[in-house]
Image (tube, coloured by chain):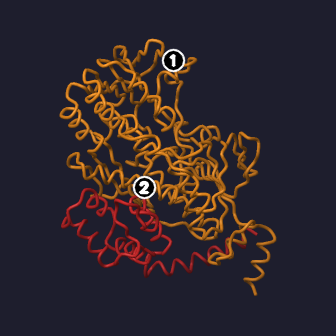
Chain colours: A orange, B red
Amino acid sequence: MKRRQFIQTASATSALGAVGLMSGCASIGGANGPKVVVVGGGYGGATAAKYVRMWSDYGIQVTLIEPNASFISCPISNLVIGGSKTMADITTSYDNLVKRHGVNLIKDYVTQIDPDKRVVKLAGGSEVPYDRLILSPGVDFMFDALPGLQKSGAQDKVLHAWKAGAQTVALRKQLEAMPDGGVYALSIPLAPYRCPPGPYERACQVAEYFSKAKPKSKVLILDANDDVTSKGPLFKKAWAERYKGIVEYRGKHNATDVDATTNTLKFEFNDDVKANVLNVIPPMRAGDIAVKSGLATANKRWCEVDFLTFESKAAKNIHVLGDSIQIAPAMPKSGHMANQHGKTCAAAVVALLTGKEPNKLPIYNNTCYSFVSSEDVVHVASVHAYNADKKTMLTVPGSGGVSSAANELEGRYALAWARNIWADTLA
Amino acid sequence: MKKLNLILASLVFASTGAMAQTAPDPMQVRSWAASCSNCHGTNGRAEAGNEALAGANKDDMVKKMLDFKAGRKPATIMHQLAKGYSDDQIVAIAGYFAAQKK
């Protein structure tokens, strides 16, 4: 009798309350079920959208807002730049999220969040209400750190290609057009940035292409960091043995400006460098919508979250995940990690919207493969577990490590990894 | 209204809390298992190239993972990942995958 009264009272006042009371029933949701809005359909957001649907037994409505027509993977995109893969190889449709999982997909982007009314406003003019909002907006670039890149046309000529898509293709075209004997210079920002080993993998991919197609050319790595930030000995071995005379690595080269008309890079302490193809990865921060909404509380760059739920420390009912967050110690900004965030967040959001307690002990791993050629691969792996005292994720002592040497077997595993994570995220 | 929800929520917590003393909470185990699915497929149903875990024999999976963990079984990466999970966690995760449809 009491329970019945509870249910009636709850239903009358709030749909959320009703769901909380009926937790465990199969009948949650429908048109009046709780609403989750996910912003950003990358590794983090797409995974969160799928798993909120799956783990709520399709009772929670999920709307995914994503401006791009399809998912283009950053992992493996360096192989498109190297020439051994195509854009089609790294592109996946959002169709399965819609057809198999009933995700409501809106091709648009969010211009504003109203946390009091709990709605997001879209560029197209409409508003979408939410009970809980999941933001996975990835990174945006701090172009003000490189004033010359803000001049008209500069960003069309000096590319980052650090979001897979049109720039990936454009950079490949610049490399194909470069004369033999030319210099490709790659500028790397200070950590943290998206995909720590990514720039070094890219250097390998371009070097392999040069070694086959234009052997008199050079790859010049200009790294703001003191030394290679990930898989250092393995990359250095590849440059010394596979790409001898092609790759040159220079640490402590913090770029401060770019002259796109002369393809010249300026540094804090070092001499200017001119190159035929200038590939500048600017410093980055949380995606625009997160920064604009006041969620980037760490250095105005990254969003601090509760690692049990990924709820923002700055706003209730708003969860942030993926590359936008202030990472835990030794946690990389990677697609694999964003997928793990997506699942951890999805479980917590489903729990919170159905009156249950979120899991107390998240444990997940990171697996990152880098291609030092079109076939041979090195990995770094780590396992991260929640530490209740420090309220953060810490690597499990004794776990993780790197490959002993680049090898072809892991090249096959790396492509299997890609197939599997794309399916786990999108299918 | 909030008070009512709180009361009910705490009742729910109390009942799941009692269960947690005997075995890990099934929702927690489901999330641990999901951390494997990046490479081994959602619910262990893998795409080509990696081992499928859905519906596999629980004891075989546990033995394999403990062998990876102890360094008895050669691997490229699994020996490093297996060391991140306790033996009890490995048993629970293997149980989850064994119960999934192939």
Residue plotted at (35% across, 28% down): A223
**Marker disc for residue A148:** 1
The chain letter under disc 1 is A
Mark 2–mark 1 CB contact (< 8 Å): no
The amino acid at mark 2 is: Met
Density class for disc 2 (Cα within 10 Å; few <14, some 14-19, many ≥20) is many
Q: Residues within 10 Å of mark 1 (few under 14, many from 20)?
A: some
Tell me where residue A247 appears, x and y as whole percent. Answer: 26, 27
Which of the 4 image quadrants contains residue A110?
top right
Mark 2 residue element: strand
- Circle 2 residue: A393
Expressed as whole percent of the image width and height from the top left, the position of residue A356 reads: 60, 71
User: Residue A192 placed where, x, y %?
Assistant: 42, 38
Cα separation between marks 2 and 1: 39 Å
Residue pictured at 39% horizontal, 18% vertical: A267
User: B22 above or below A313?
Assistant: below
In the displayed structure image, the side of residue A58 where residue A238 appears, left or right: left
Counting residues from the start of the chain, the first of labels 2 and 1 encountered is 1
Tell which of A390 and A175 is nearer to you: A175
Judge if badges 2 and 1 mark residues of a common chain: yes
**Residue occupying image coordinates x 52% and y 44%:** A324
Q: Please state the horizontal and vertical placement of residue A161, each as a whole percent of the image.
A: 46, 32
Q: Is residue A324 left or right of residue B54?
A: right
Per the image, label 1 sits on a secondary structure element best described as helix
Q: Of residues A410 and A220, which is closer to you in this image?
A: A410
User: What's the residue at 26%, 45% (across, down)?
Assistant: A376
